[in-house]
Amino acid sequence: MIDYTKKLTTHREFYPSSDLDWSVESDRGRIISSPAFRRLQKRTQVFALELNAAVRSRLTHSLEVSQTARFIAKTILKKLDDENLKELENAFISTAEMGSLLHDIGNPPFGHFGEMAINEWMTKCCSKHLDNLVENSELKEKLVKDLCSYDGNAQAIRIVHKLQRLNLSYAQTASVIKYTRGAFEDKPQDTQLSYLKKKPGYYYSEKNFVNTILDTLDIKSGHRFPITYIMEAADDISYLSADIEDAVDKGILTLEKIYELIITETDVVNKKYNTNATMLLDIVENNYKKAKEKEDEPYQFNMFLTLTRAQLIFKLVEYVADLYIANHDAIYEGSFNSALLEFDKTHECSIAVEVLQNISYRYIYTHKQVQTLEIKGHSIIQGLFNIYEPLLSLSTQEFEKLTANKSVDCLVCKNLLERLSQKHFVAYKRSISELKNDKDYPLLEWYFRARLIIDWISGMTDDYALHEYKELSA
């Protein structure tokens, strides 16, 4: 039975409120005031280290996603017309909106390419240092897998719980758990929850916390929180016109080229699915004609994009809301095994999404400007890890001596340790304080030490990472 009072609750780790609306507003304030949220203003969307403030950062992207999520949530409530859910209207909408503000909070410098650079480096590091530290075991295999599977979604949960200690409500935190597999777990062989588990959603370090959330909100293992589907759809919608607009600002695409590519790609995707969807094409052709006839050349693209974006978002939001309602039981349970906009590949809205995604992948993400920035980001990330690697070369006993202000043979280790965030170091200390009598203490200590370094470097903004790399590599 669908009962959102079991999902939208006031439960949180510390100091829960008895008033749901107060709890929701508390979450909103904590998120917006968070340093991790503010750092999104200096993080890559597509174009790293961008000086033009009109080109999107992770912060401006997240603001757009939150607005779209709010629109979707309000549309769902209007279409459902459920008296019981209306009493939770504020909590339903705000949880979708704030989850969307948080959704990219775990992304490292230089975006998804930064994620790959971290995982590549950690794979080599684990082989180099961990093999000599402990014998092979099931736990070691899990922790290596966990450390080599950095993902912005999983890091977001770590930031909320351990690094920033935002003490958000369990409902608000659950809305950000986009994928339901631990980074220490294998991808499932079965197809029942394959989409929900296709990427890591949380780390071994947050396993117990996530299990508490699932138990409290009556979410089965491997299942999702229902409002997460709204956040995901809002994210997918917001990307569509944003990357194209930024590409025009960067001189990669022109209005004429975009018009030409949409016509070409629509034909390609229609042939792929044996469809004849013209929704996107009709919107684009109409607005292209208006822009050419009614605006001066410098403003033609602005008019074209404004009209196209508004009309397209309206249609996609309506479609997503209808899908949410049509599959309400599965979505409420968290077993709906698809992104809403990927559910029916032949629907005109999904065709439009694929057309615009293809243009971004083929003509923006592979452009020389973007690739050059990715290479630069890769060098910076790997260079920073190389600089901080001596801290991971120490034995457990040596690192304990270092943290107790005692000297060790490594000359630079004390200086490197003092550069780390004090908040991150406290998170490390709290984690290992519970492990002293554990037979796997050396392994677990090294795991949390590696997390400490990952937390520090992945939490940098693009420009700070560049500055730190230049500063320390002389």
Image: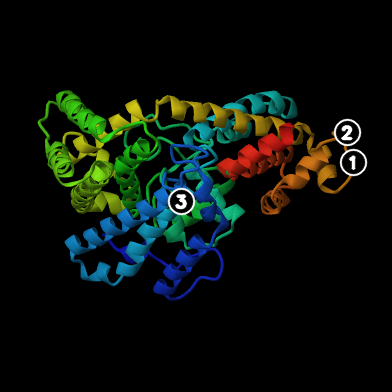
Q: Tell me what residue is drawn at x 17 percent, y 60 percent.
A: 79
Q: Nearer the viewer, residue 63 or 138?
A: 63
Residue type for callout 2: Asp
For the residues labelled 1 and 3, the Cα–Cα distance comes to 42 Å
Please, is residue 471 above or below residue 431 in the view?
A: above
Dot 2 alpha-carbon crowd within 10 angstroms: few under 14, some 14 to 19, many 20 or more: few
Tell me the residue that label 1 is attached to: 407
Dot 1 alpha-carbon crowd within 10 angstroms: few under 14, some 14 to 19, many 20 or more: some
Q: Tell me what residue is drawn at x 16 percent, y 43 percent.
A: 287
Tell me the residue that label 3 is attached to: 59
Please, is residue 251 above or below residue 106 in the view?
A: above
For the residues labelled 2 and 1, the Cα–Cα distance comes to 7 Å
For the residues labelled 2 and 3, the Cα–Cα distance comes to 43 Å
Task: Using residue 373 as the reference point, say whether residue 82 is left or right of it.
Answer: left
Mark 1 secondary-structure assignment: loop
Instruction: Kindly give the residue lying farthest to the left in the view shown.
Output: 276
Tell me the residue that label 2 is attached to: 409
Q: Quadrant of residue 130?
A: top right
What percent of the width, then of the height, locates residue 378? 56, 29
